[in-house]
Image (spheres, grey):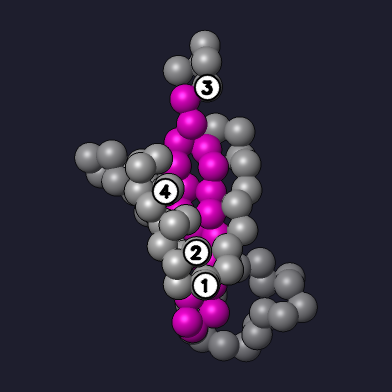
Amino acid sequence: MCVNRSGIAIFPADLNDPKAYKHSKNVKLDHLAFKVDSENFEKAKLKFLSLDISYEIQDHYYFESIYINNPDDNVVELATPRKIEGEF
């Protein structure tokens, strides 16, 4: 979902994952993703480093993502679009 260049995506959990508790009536999520611009993406990396928060970066070709686990162990993704030469 995007509004005025801001966006959020909610990814459902894989209920076939053996770690998923299938009998809970609570909402099950794999992770939350937020769209950020490249400046804030770089600021987030620096902030995570300064706070000694571990993170993982993944290249998704059209965008780059940084993943962290929040204090409740939920996965949070910050994604920044890439401008691919000749494709946009």
Relative to 63, residue 42 above or below: below
Q: Are marks 2 and 1 in contact (CB under 8 Å)?
A: yes
Q: Is residue 19 visible?
A: yes
Badge 4 marks a residue whose secondary structure is helix
Query: Which mark is on residue 84?
Result: 3
Few, some or many residues within 10 Å of mark 1 (<14, 14–19, 20+): few
Q: Amino acid at mark 1?
A: Asp
Q: Amino acid at mark 2?
A: Leu
Between the C-alphas of marks 4 and 3, the distance is 17 Å
The numbered mark, 4 or 3, whose residue comes first in the sequence reads 4
The stretch of residues the image draws in magenta is 63-83
Between the C-alphas of marks 2 and 1, the distance is 5 Å
The numbered mark, 2 or 3, whose residue comes first in the sequence reads 2
Residue at the spot of label 1:
52
The numbered mark, 4 or 1, whose residue comes first in the sequence reads 4
Badge 1 marks a residue whose secondary structure is loop
Residue at the spot of label 4:
41
Few, some or many residues within 10 Å of mark 4 (<14, 14–19, 20+): some
Judge depth for marks 1 and 3 and give the one in front: 1
Relative to 19, residue 68 above or below: above
Few, some or many residues within 10 Å of mark 3 (<14, 14–19, 20+): few
Q: Residue at x 65, y 85 (%)?
A: 21
